[in-house]
Image (cartoon, rainbow, N blue to C red):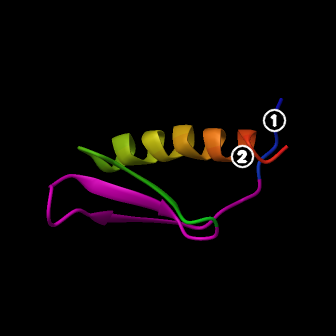
Amino acid sequence: MHRYPRLDVIVSPDSELGGCVARAVDVEVASQGETEQEALDALTDALELYFEGDH
């Protein structure tokens, strides 16, 4: 089981493309989705890849 740090996340509407943007402010990783949940799910995937390279 992987343990990841607790991160602050901001979710906001994407005024240019529609949908939502989720951003982990501590590591400057962001993702987007049609809904808030899709953006958060995509951010989780992006963060897993980000931290994989941190070993």
Q: Secondary structure at mark 2?
A: helix
Q: Is residue 22 magenta?
A: yes
Say the numbered circle drawn on residue 36: none
Is there CB contact under 8 Å for labels 2 and 1? yes
Q: Most extreme residue toward the top, as rendered?
A: 1
42 relative to 28, above or below: above
- For the record, the magenta segment spans 5-26
Residue at 47% of width from left, 62% of height from top? 23
Q: Bin the neighbour count of mark 1 within 10 Å (Cα to Cα): few under 14, some 14-19, many 20 and up.
A: few
Which quadrant holds the C terminus? top right
Residue 15's x, y, as percent?
Answer: 16, 67
Q: Label 1 sits on what residue type?
A: His
Which quadrant holds the N terminus? top right
Pointer 2 or 1: first along the chain: 1
Residue 49 placement: quadrant: top right
Residue 4's x, y, as percent?
Answer: 77, 48
Residue 10's x, y, as percent?
Answer: 45, 67
Spatial CA distance of label 2 from label 1 is: 10 Å
Q: Bin the neighbour count of mark 2 within 10 Å (Cα to Cα): few under 14, some 14-19, many 20 and up.
A: few
Would residue 14 be found to the left or right of residue 49 on screen?
A: left
Residue at 14% of width from left, 63% of height from top? 16
6 relative to 45, above or below: below
Residue at 34% of width from left, 58% of height from top? 21
Q: Label 2 sits on what residue type?
A: Phe
Residue 9's x, y, as percent?
Answer: 53, 64
Which residue lies under the disc numbered 2? 51
Q: Secondary structure at mark 1?
A: loop
Q: Is residue 8 magenta?
A: yes
Residue 33 placement: quadrant: top left
Say the numbered circle drawn on residue 2: 1
